[in-house]
Amino acid sequence: MIIDAFRTGEGEVHAPVDFGRSLGLLHIPKKDGTIALTPLMALEEHGGWHVVASAAGSPRHPAWTFGLRRADEIDLEVAGDLGEPIRVVRVAVTELEGAERDRVWETFKQAGPSFAGYEATAEGRVFPIFRLTPVEQPDAS
């Protein structure tokens, strides 16, 4: 439902969760070779995006976390400015650690108040955060 809302709403989603234009659709490889489409809040920063494996505060990592950890690169669908089409960007995947991970986690908590509440239900689980950085694509000419 969120994926359809993202694509038909030109990248803007307000229901069932209000992502606005901050949703990213990740194409995450699964062990069997297929691709899982995972809609997540994608916070843009310095030309890339951050996503967090919060699983709404579950004490367990979402299954897609392991696929993202195995991937060097994935495709990410993101919205441009209002009126612009959704674009697919090839991105390199890096899991953040230490102070950088903590800084970005604070940014998520400021961007969405529900993130702060997730800490209370996660039973001490530290939520993985990934940086998705655009990869230069070779010129097709």
Image (spheres, rainbow, N blue to C red):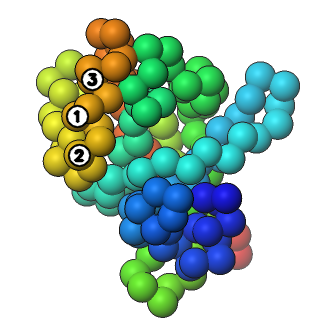
- What residue is pinned by disc 2? 113
Asked if marks 1 and 3 touch (Cβ < 8 Å), the reply is yes
Is 99 situated above or below 9? above
Quarter holding the N terminus? bottom right
Residue drawn at x 29%, y 42% is: 114
Residue drawn at x 68%, y 66% is: 4
Q: Amino acid at mark 1?
A: Ala
Residue drawn at x 32%, y 57% is: 44
Q: Position of residue 100 (x, y in %)?
A: 19, 30
User: Which quarter of the figure has residue 101?
Assistant: top left
> CA–CA distance between discs 3 and 2?
11 Å
Task: Report helix, strand or loop for mark 2.
Answer: helix
User: Reading the chain from its start, which is encountered first: label 3 or label 2?
Assistant: 2
Q: Position of residue 25 (x, y in %)?
A: 58, 54
Report the disc number at residue 119: 3
- Residue reaching furthest to the bottom: 83
- What residue is pinned by disc 1? 116
Task: Report helix, strand or loop for mark 3.
Answer: helix
Name the one closer to the observer, 62 or 18: 18
Asked if marks 1 and 2 touch (Cβ < 8 Å), the reply is yes
> CA–CA distance between discs 1 and 2?
6 Å
Task: Report helix, strand or loop for mark 1.
Answer: helix
User: Which quarter of the figure has residue 35?
Assistant: top right
Is 97 situated above or below 55? above
Q: Amino acid at mark 2?
A: Pro
